[in-house]
Amino acid sequence: MTLGHVDLVARALALFGRVTVVVAHNPAKPGFFSAEERVGLLEKSLAHLAGVAVELAPGLVVDAAREFGCDVIVRGVRSGTDFDFEVAMARTNRVLSPALDTVLLAPAPQFAHVSSSLVREIELAGGDAAAFVPKCVAAAFKARKQGAAKRTPLTVTTRPRRGPR
């Protein structure tokens, strides 16, 4: 969950009056947090926006849209690569569910370069991605890293000395 996601949800809310954010498990994208943890972080990050619900759904997004009474999917596109991918996905979703439309929104300029993958890479490399995520997500990253440090035993290796002692 990045600040770009928060911006996208707020803008979608202004357009549609009600937004359901669906969290799904994507095996191609290893997450830093479980799907259930992401739901909780999204709920905290979006709590200031009345009219937003966060749901966990397995399977296809078209099935989730039907289940939650949604007739529009809103997706953010940061680049031409995102656009090409999202248009292909929108066309596929349209075949699977002809009544379902997709709206693509360009991000606010300050978020155009931020992706969940970038944030995850910063955090996994020991960096601090707080500038790109809501405060509760930054706190969750910090807590997760502190917990991992406590669980990871310290390994000390020694090399034999070279030369005389």
Image (cartoon, grey):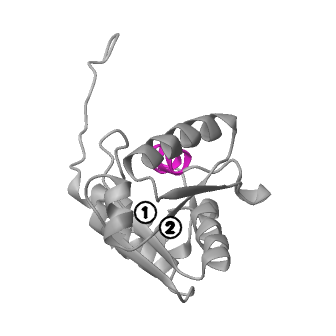
One can see residue 1 in this view: yes
- Kindly report the distance in space between the C-alpha atoms of the residues bearing marks 2 and 1: 5 Å
- Image coords of residue 148 (percent x, y): 29, 56
Left or right: 34, with 44 as reference point: left
Which residue lies under the disc numbered 2? 138
Q: Around disc 1, counting alpha carbons within 10 Å, would you say few (fewer than 14), some (14 to 19), or many (20 or more)?
A: many
> 29 or 148: nearer the eye?
29
State the residue lying farthest toward the front: 98
Above or below for 48 versus 84: below
Q: Tell how many labels.
A: 2
Considering the numbered disc 1 on the image, is that residue within a helix, a strand or a loop?
helix
- Image coords of residue 78 (percent x, y): 67, 46
Q: Which residues are magenta?
A: 116-126
- Check disc 1 and give the amino acid type: Phe
120 magenta-colored: yes
- Check disc 2 and give the amino acid type: Ala
Left or right: 119, with 41 as reference point: right
Q: Are marks 2 and 1 in contact (CB under 8 Å)?
A: yes
Considering the numbered disc 2 on the image, is that residue within a helix, a strand or a loop?
helix
One can see residue 33 in this view: no
Main secondary structure type of the part rendered in magenta:
helix
53 magenta-colored: no
Left or right: 76, with 136 as reference point: right
Which residue lies under the disc numbered 1? 141
- Image coords of residue 23 (percent x, y): 37, 63
Above or below for 52 versus 90: below
- Image coords of residue 163 (percent x, y): 35, 10
Instruction: State the residue at coordinates (63%, 51%).
Output: 114
Q: Around disc 2, counting alpha carbons within 10 Å, would you say few (fewer than 14), some (14 to 19), or many (20 or more)?
A: some
State the residue lying farthest toward the right: 109
> 136 or 18: nearer the eye?
18
Instruction: State the residue at coordinates (37%, 56%).
Output: 62
